[in-house]
Amino acid sequence: KMYHNGYVESLPVQLPEIENLIKDYFTNHYNHNFICRHKKELVIDFIEKFVPWLNTGHLKFKGLKDFKNVYITNGVTEFIQTTMVEHSIKPVLVENEYSAYFAHAKTYIRSGVKLDNKIDVISLPFCRTADIHPKTCEILDKPSWVDLAWAGNSGIKETFDLSKSEYVTFSFSKCFGVQYHRIGICFSKKPVETLDIEKGFDYVNVVGVELMKFIMTQISPSYLYDKYKDIAHKICVDNNLQPTKSLWIGLEDGKRKPLIEYWMKYLNEKRK
């Protein structure tokens, strides 16, 4: 099979629009020497363009401009690993939250790392339902960690104020199906000095930054959802699943059911 039965989190597929743009970028636009000469300006340009781009989607956010520390990371996970240790964060999780927070915290505590600063974590949209968790507004009203990994390609049409949050993380994995390109952008009220070391040399995935920026100029955060939502709905109905506001998951007896095997079948049939 083309997916891992034991994988703990849902994976998106890479839809043809994204696949074609990636091929176009590396065939006609990628220039290693240009990136080496201009990496600092390219990273700054990406950071400046990200929030306005994100807010062209259905799901919008206020307050991100107030975060003074912005980092390019290998998805959300690198930020979790680094910030949890440096800021001694002990995540307080709602039931069935993204498992990486608990897994990393458990490993660090077992290794003797002290995690003393409790902070509420919420994925927005919630990673198990692709909808708004009932405790979201309560958590956003205090210092918190907001995980926007599922915000790209969401069908939710609401605006949330993140100004009271301490950390906000976003990954392009679910948005564009680029999970193996490992591109995230993360916001912190306090400096994360470990990441500042690399940031000082712009020693980050600048190729990925340029690739995401190239895609962002042509694909909005909601474009793929709007185009493919009817297909996702049909996949769910045909397989006795409850549709959600994500392309990538349905619900089976109230529990998340990844749709990746059905999407793979759909794309393989389209390519014949």
Image (cartoon, rainbow, N blue to C red):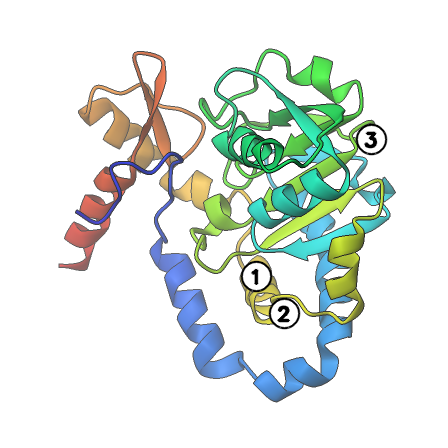
**Mark 3 sits on what residue?**
163
Percent coordinates x, y for residue 40 in the rendering: 77, 73
Gap in Å between the C-alphas at discs 2 and 3? 28 Å
**Which of label 2 and label 3 is nearer to you?**
2
For the residue labelled by badge 2, is the local secondary structure a helix, a strand or a loop?
A: helix
Gap in Å between the C-alphas at discs 3 and 1? 25 Å
Gap in Å between the C-alphas at discs 2 and 1? 10 Å
Percent coordinates x, y for residue 66 in the rendering: 86, 41
**Mark 2 sits on what residue?**
206
Question: Which of disc 3 and disc 2 is earlier in sequence?
Answer: 3
**Which of label 2 and label 1 is nearer to you?**
2
Nearer to the camera, 35 or 23: 35
- Tell me the amino acid under the disc marked 3: Ser
- Count the numbered circles shown: 3
- Tell me the amino acid under the disc marked 1: Met
Please give left or right for residue 197 compared with residue 134 in the image: right
- Tell me the amino acid under the disc marked 2: Val
